[in-house]
Image: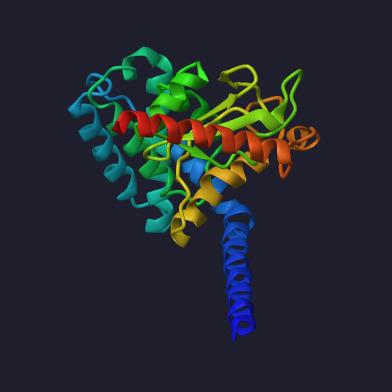
Amino acid sequence: MYVYMFRRIVILCFGCIAIISILVYCNTHLYRSNYEEVGVIAAGYITEIDVAFLSDEYFFELNGLFEKVMNEKIDRYNKSMMERAAATVVLNKMMNDLEGDTEALETHDNKMRYFETFDNHIRTLDQITERMHYFRNILNTYSDAPVKLEDMIDLAANGQWHLFSAEYHLFFYGDLNGALNVKFISDDGRFEAVYNTETGEIVTDPANMGTYNYAPGAFDLLKFINHTIYDKEPWKRWGNVEGFAYEDIMKLESGRGTDEARENNLEVEMLIEKMQIEIVN
């Protein structure tokens, strides 16, 4: 009976992997022509908004801009194509505005509204552009993640961040022992921060750095697929930063699957649990 159940589980897992692979392939290859056409359509729009950046009126105007572009009647482009073009126009506008005033978002009341609006429009697309991919690094700077690991452990003990699998952040870069890296994600899953237990500080090198998630992954199948499409596949295509490709990352030695990495992660987990007990008591 148990053998039969095990076989069913294995078959189900392979089935899920196959479905995800097919969906990702369609987004990466079959929709490429649409992806390029969407960019062409979006490039034709002027997006001046005469209101204060990040104000409530700003987001109201963004919604109006989206509706205006989506409802345009252009020969040979259907509503779905125009919806993606509209999302691209809004995203380009939001990137331009933040890059022009990076300090505005740090303490603004509409800080989370910016992230939510941006992420929602990202997930309207079949694929993201290279600029959108690297823009996640700007967004991740607003995570408020501390420089010191001990401070992050304190935040994790209080439930604001969570220790997560660091399997793709265990690379030996320069003098860094990658097997001693640990990864944390913010409570909403958007932000990432990687630390090295030997240095006790945050890791920012191009191989191991934490990045912003447009579609945080979960055990929910749809969320996992979105995370693959909008976060993992772009990473495999462009790496974390310009000039250091995914292929360059994969050439590095990794601590993935080693006893050293497992024991290191377990030690940090125990430190968090110890601090949680102290908080309760």
Task: Say how the picture is coloured.
Answer: rainbow
47 or 129: nearer the eye?
129
Instruction: Identify the image quadrant of the N terminus.
Output: bottom right
Q: Quadrant of the C terminus?
A: top left
Please report the residue visible at 52 percent of the width from the left and 26 percent of the height from the top: 137
Picture layout, residue 263 above or below residue 199:
below
Residue 78, picture quadrant = bottom left
Q: Is residue 109 toward the left or the right of residue 97 in the image?
A: left
Residue at far front of view: 281
Q: Is residue 80 visible?
A: yes
Question: Residue 188's quadrant in the figure?
Answer: top left
In terms of image quadrants, where is residue 51?
Answer: top left
Q: Nearer the viewer, residue 102 or 173?
A: 173
Residue 224 screen position, x and y as percent: 50, 55
Q: In the image shown, does 128 or 145 lie closer to the viewer?
A: 145
The answer to whether one can see residue 132 in this image is no
Q: Position of residue 250 (x, y in %)?
A: 76, 38
Q: Is residue 174 left or right of residue 81?
A: right
Residue beneath the point at 45% across and 45% down: 216
206 sits left or right of 222 in the view: right
Residue at image point 46% right, 42% down:
41
Q: Position of residue 143 (x, y in %)?
A: 41, 25
How many numbered marks, from 0 up?
Answer: 0
Residue lying furthest bottom: 1
| Residue at 54% in and 50% down | 229
- Outermost residue on the left side: it is 57
Q: 65 above or below 278? A: below
Q: Where 25 sits versus 131, above or below? A: below
Q: Position of residue 206 (x, y in %)?
A: 66, 25
